[in-house]
Amino acid sequence: MHSLENIRCMNDAVLLIYTGGTIGMKMNPEIGSLSPFNFDQIVEEVPELRKFNVRIDTMAFDPIIDSSNLRPEVWSKIAAVIKDNYDKYDGFVILHGTDTMAYSASALSFMTANLTKPIIFTGSQLPIGELRTDGKENLITAIEIAAARDPQGKPYVSEVCVYFQNQLFRGNRTTKYNAEHFRAFRSPNYPPLAEAGINIHYNTPYIYPMAGMNTEFDVSTEMSPDVVVIKIFPGISAHIFESILSIDWLKGVVLETYGSGNAPTDKWFMNAIRSAVERGVIVVNVTQCQAGSVEMARYETGVGLLDAGVVSGYDITCEAAVTKLMYLIGQKISDCEIKRLMNVSIRGEISPKS
Ligand code: ASP
């Protein structure tokens, strides 16, 4: 772990964890493409970091990864680093590729319980070494939010968030929706937790309450890989659908359905789902729509799924649904308990009114 120089005040400290992604890259003239720079030299790339009134320690994963290559082991590694350093820092900033950031922020929100400190994911669309980079602002404001305290000395946020282009979001509500714009993330079913302009305005009523004094911060690193996401579409093949659902070791399915949770009523389709559910597979219904909620009782095409034992994901994102399933299955709790917990919010990933 490395400390940045010119520290003004040693009382508050933020741990900056670089896992990979565009933000930590620079054009390598020798090979003519982007490659990661030595993260120990971050202060040379962002000299503004010297002006912070908090200590910023940095650590880089080895190897650093393009987030498209991410596997749950990386989430476990991030969770373990936070656990080992939890008492030493006031907040954590995780630099991460944008491609799977919404999955990682969702996963970490489930893997960490009873948080009293902010964990802020950020990254960039353009490398930090480029003139027009969005990375500097994202990094600087993410650190500022991770270190910020209200007049009572409490953090403004104590949950897993994504900070991108002036907006702070609940991590498990985000989705990457733009591959081009600097504003790459959206939180379609939940308002931003903060907006950064001249000042940073916190949207306090929407921020997850800080864990109580008599709870203990807890980390779970067990994530089950035995899950799949199936997006239905007109003409989906019975053979392919049945084959996937009859895989022996399959434990969880996120079914991306139409509109408010509707799917074909074909016999083969319903039978495949019914027999998977009877085998103990947890099937969760999420909508393919960018925003809104599943409401299975609304149409006949949704009622069938409900009767077959499919669990409503309400307004959860697909990213949060799949990582929540991985987390809950990894907890080795009963199927009945997994279904119950998939149906309710455990970290603010489902809206109360859903
Ligand atoms: N492929 C990169 C990644 O996700 C893209 C990025 O960082 O924006 O790691």
Image (cartoon, helix red, strand yellow):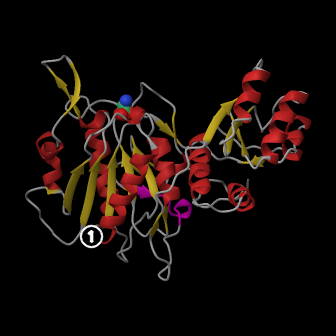
Camera-nearest residue between 101 and 170: 101
If the picture is divided into quarters, which one holds ligand 1? top left
Is-magenta flag for residue 313?
no
Tell me which residue sits at (77%, 17%) in the image.
235
Camera-nearest residue between 19 and 194: 19
Q: Point out the residue furthest to the left here.
A: 6
Q: How many marks?
A: 1
Tell me which residue sits at (31%, 50%) in the image.
141
Tell me which residue sits at (66%, 41%) in the image.
250
Camera-nearest residue between 232 and 271: 271
Q: Quadrant of residue 165?
A: top left
Instruction: Evaluate whether residue 204 shows in this view.
Output: yes
Q: Circle 1: is it few (<14), some (14-19), or many (20+) Cα within 10 Å?
A: few
In the rendering, at what x and y percent does residue 93 appear?
32, 53
Residue pointed to by mark 1:
88
Instruction: Evaluate whether residue 190 shows in this view.
Output: no
Secondary structure at numbered mark 1: helix
Tell me which residue sits at (17%, 51%) in the image.
49
In the rendering, at what x and y percent does residue 261 appear?
78, 38
In the depicted structure, whether residue 216 falls above or below residue 266: below
Q: Point out the residue furthest to the front here.
A: 248
In the rendering, at what x and y percent does residue 60 appear?
24, 47
Q: Mark 1 is on which residue type?
A: Lys
Residue numbers of the magenta segment: 201-208
In the rendering, at what x and y percent does residue 310 appear?
79, 46
Direction from residue 115 to residue 226 in the image, left or right: right
